[in-house]
Structure formats: C-alpha cells, structure tokens
Image (cartoon, rainbow, N blue to C red):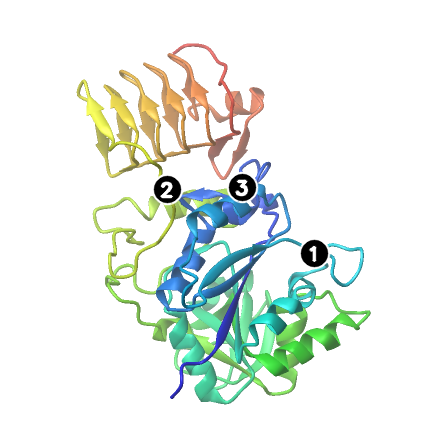
C-alpha cells in the first residue's frame, strides 16, 4: 500500500485560564513542563516519531513565546518536504478571530489546499502522553469511514467529567455525549467508558465539506467536539480508536497507556510528580520514543557542599549548593543555596532559592527569587495575604517575582 498523504493540524490557540498565572504571559501549549520541555513538545514529538512530518500549528492567544519555541526548536529538514510551521490567526474569512476550534481550521483551509492531503490529523496541543499516530491513521483508513476519534478508557464512575463516546461493539460511534450524568459502559468492560482525547483523523474531502457546512450555520458553536464530530456521528460515519490498542516502542508496563489532561494547576503539578519516582508513571527516559525539544545550552547540574536531590529531576545549569531537593522538578539554571529546602515543587528556569529558605508544594515561574530565610508554601493563608494564587493546595508564584516575607 502506498504511504498515505497526511497533513497534521495542531490546535494550539488555547488560553488556559485554569492554569493562571502560568498562562498570564503565554499560551497554554507554551507552558513549561518536565524541566526542559513545553507542553506542545509532546504532541509534536508523537507526530514526528510517527513519521508524520507535515505539521501546521494554529496559534492565537498570547502566542509569541509559542511561536518562538516552534521556530527555534522544531526546524525540520526541508529536503523531503518536512515542516513544522506556526500559523497565526489570519482573518482570511473576515474581520474576526477564531470563533472555535472548527472555525480555526476553516479559516486556515488554505493550508489544506496547499498541501493537498488525502487525510487530515487534528490533535490538541496540551496533553501529556505518547502515541504512535500512524497506527490511528491506518485504523482510520481500514475502517472506510470519514472520521476517527481517539478514546481512552476511564472508570465509568469518573466518566461524567469527560466528553464520552458511546460506541457499538464494531467501534462505530452511536453518540457523542458531553459530561453525561449516566455514562455508557463499554461492551467488553461495563465498568469503563470511552473518554474523548480530543484527537481526530479525517478523510480530507468529507472533513472540508463538514467545515464549510458548519461555517454557514447560525446555531453552531464552531467547535470540533461540540459540532463537527456529532455531525459525523449522526450520519453513521465515525468510529472510536481505542488508545489501549496503541503500541509505542520502549513503553514500560507502568507507563503504557499514560495520558493526562493538565488543564488545572492540580493536574499539572500531579503530572510532574508522575515523572520522578524510581519507576515513573510517565517515563521521560524512553530512548525509543523520545520527547524532542530545544535543550538549554548550559553545563551539567552541579551538587556541592553536600547538596542533595532525592526522587527529583534536576536540569542542566542547576547548582545545588548545600541545599536539599526532594520530590521536585527543577528547570535549567536554578540555584539552591545552603540549607535551603525544596519539597514537592516545580521550579521554572533561572529561579534562585536563598539559604535557609523553604519552598514546599509550590510552582515558581521563571526568574523568581526566594530570599534568605523566607518560607513559601508552608502557610497557605500567609501566601494568599502576600498576593499569591493558591490552587489545589499549591502556591503559584508569577515570573520575575522577588518573594517577600519574614525570615524563618
């Protein structure tokens, strides 16, 4: 069989209000993750590792850092026609910004006309997972249907929090339900339900027709999950792709099938904690399916004066000068001074943690300074009184902040 001609579209215009203040100055897909990555690196790595190397990233909200990251980190060889290109909102169809995820693609149909693909992959930009996308594309082609939706099995008791796929035994989708009170179970597992991952594969002609029809509808929200997918379901032309069938090279028994929506501060922090155990729930060290990015040009991390780190990720350029780091993730160029202590925290680039200070259950954005003897995350009410957001038991400090407070 000839290799299918596929265009991949990554929806990266998300505002990420629930991740404030981390999204105060950047789009959600540009939020740092795992020390050296951005959230968007995970979907782009999955596509590139799947040999799907014609990729358009649709941006809109506070996109400067995201555009810069894509242009610097994702330079593909053009010899064989590969590219990752950032596409801002262009107002090609009128003087309005994107009205929804479907409208974002409709306003960018020139990309489809230029590439002239047979199939179109549409993925979100801000989840943490590994996936061989080519397997999903081949399952789509084999089905003969025009729409395939990736579904992940979740406990039925928790399924009301998700968009749910009601699928028949032959995997054809009967209904697409938004956070149903009584989620349908699966034919082979009544205590489980299929939650939509927000990842889709379409046959090009049918998808373009659906977008054109949606654009002229006065009642549509112009949303992929809310309008486009239900249209394919209604015509009997949609199937579910079971994420548990996806096989990724190098996956461990523990991290196989891992997928996390990091749309809240609590989920974002919890996903970091999944990275750091001896046998991590998500293994960043899988060399057979690497997560790609542009790494900081900095020397290796240095530990001096009995500095320690336990069950933590410590990135390049960090100096642990007599302090202690426990169950935390440190981005590049973080300095931890004598007798300082960091616990269960996520620290972004270029932060400085002063001697005798304590940082506990915190997320510190870039360039934060915690002065000598100051405690952060120990007394949440005191943190609020200092003007810091406290969400899900975590204290979040915006970038470029010098933390005030009494010495301990």
User: Residue 47 bears which disc, if any?
Assistant: none
The label number, if any, that marks residue 65 in the structure image: 3
Q: Compare marks 2 and 1 and give the one earlier in the sequence.
A: 2
Q: Mark 1 points at which residue?
A: 90
In the displayed structure, would residue 314 be above or below residue 284? above
- Give how far apart the Cα atoms at labels 3 and 1 are: 18 Å
Write down the residue under mark 2: 36
Say whether disc 2 or disc 3 marks the residue closer to the N-terminus: 2
Instruction: Give the number of callouts.
Output: 3
- Foreground mark, 3 or 1, reads 1
Kind of element beneath mark 1:
loop
Q: Is residue 264 visible?
A: no
- Residues 253 and 84: in front is 84
The quadrant of the picture occupied by the N terminus is: bottom left
The tag earlier along the polypeptide, 3 or 1, is 3
**Whole-percent x, y for residue 367 in the image:** 46, 25
- Identify which residue, 347 or 266, lies in the foreground: 347
């Amino acid at each position: 069989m000839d290799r299918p001609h596929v265009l991949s579209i990554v929806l990266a215009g998300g505002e990420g209000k629930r991740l404030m203040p981390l999204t105060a100055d950047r789009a959600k897909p540009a939020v740092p993750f795992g020390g050296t990555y951005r959230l968007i690196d995970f979907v782009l790595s999955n596509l590139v590792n799947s040999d799907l190397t014609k990729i358009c990233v649709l941006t809109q909200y506070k996109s400067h850092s995201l555009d810069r990251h894509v242009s610097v980190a994702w330079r593909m060889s053009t010899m064989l026609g590969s590219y990752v290109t950032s596409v801002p909102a262009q107002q090609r169809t009128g003087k309005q910004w994107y009205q929804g995820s479907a409208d974002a693609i409709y306003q960018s149909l020139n990309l489809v006309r230029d590439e002239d693909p047979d199939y179109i992959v549409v993925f979100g930009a801000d989840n943490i997972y590994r996936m061989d996308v080519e397997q999903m594309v081949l399952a789509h082609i084999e089905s003969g249907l025009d729409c395939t939706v990736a579904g992940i099995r979740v406990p039925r008791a928790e399924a009301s929090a998700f968009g749910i796929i009601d699928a028949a035994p032959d995997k054809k989708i009967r209904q697409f339900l938004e956070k149903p009170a009584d989620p349908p179970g699966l034919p082979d597992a009544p205590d489980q339900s299929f939650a939509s991952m927000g990842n889709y594969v379409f046959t090009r002609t049918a998808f373009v027709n659906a977008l054109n029809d949606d654009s002229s509808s006065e009642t549509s929200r112009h949303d992929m999950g809310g309008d486009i997918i239900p249209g394919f379901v209604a015509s009997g032309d949609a199937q579910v792709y079971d994420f548990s069938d996806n096989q990724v090279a190098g996956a461990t028994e523990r991290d196989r099938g891992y997928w996390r929506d990091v749309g809240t501060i609590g989920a974002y922090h919890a996903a970091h904690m999944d990275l750091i155990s001896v046998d991590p729930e998500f293994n960043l060290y899988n060399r057979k399916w690497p997560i790609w990015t542009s790494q900081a040009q900095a020397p290796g991390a240095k530990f001096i004066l009995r500095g320690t780190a336990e069950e933590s990720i410590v990135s390049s350029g960090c100096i642990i000068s007599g302090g202690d780091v426990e169950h935390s993730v440190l981005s590049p160029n973080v300095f931890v001074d004598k007798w300082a202590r960091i616990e269960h925290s996520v620290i972004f680039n270029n932060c400085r943690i002063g001697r005798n200070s304590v940082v506990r259950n915190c997320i510190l954005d870039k360039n934060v300074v915690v002065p000598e003897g100051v405690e952060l995350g120990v007394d949440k009410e005191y943190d609020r009184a200092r003007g810091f957001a406290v969400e899900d038991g975590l204290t979040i400090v915006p970038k470029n902040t010098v933390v005030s407070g009494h010495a301990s």
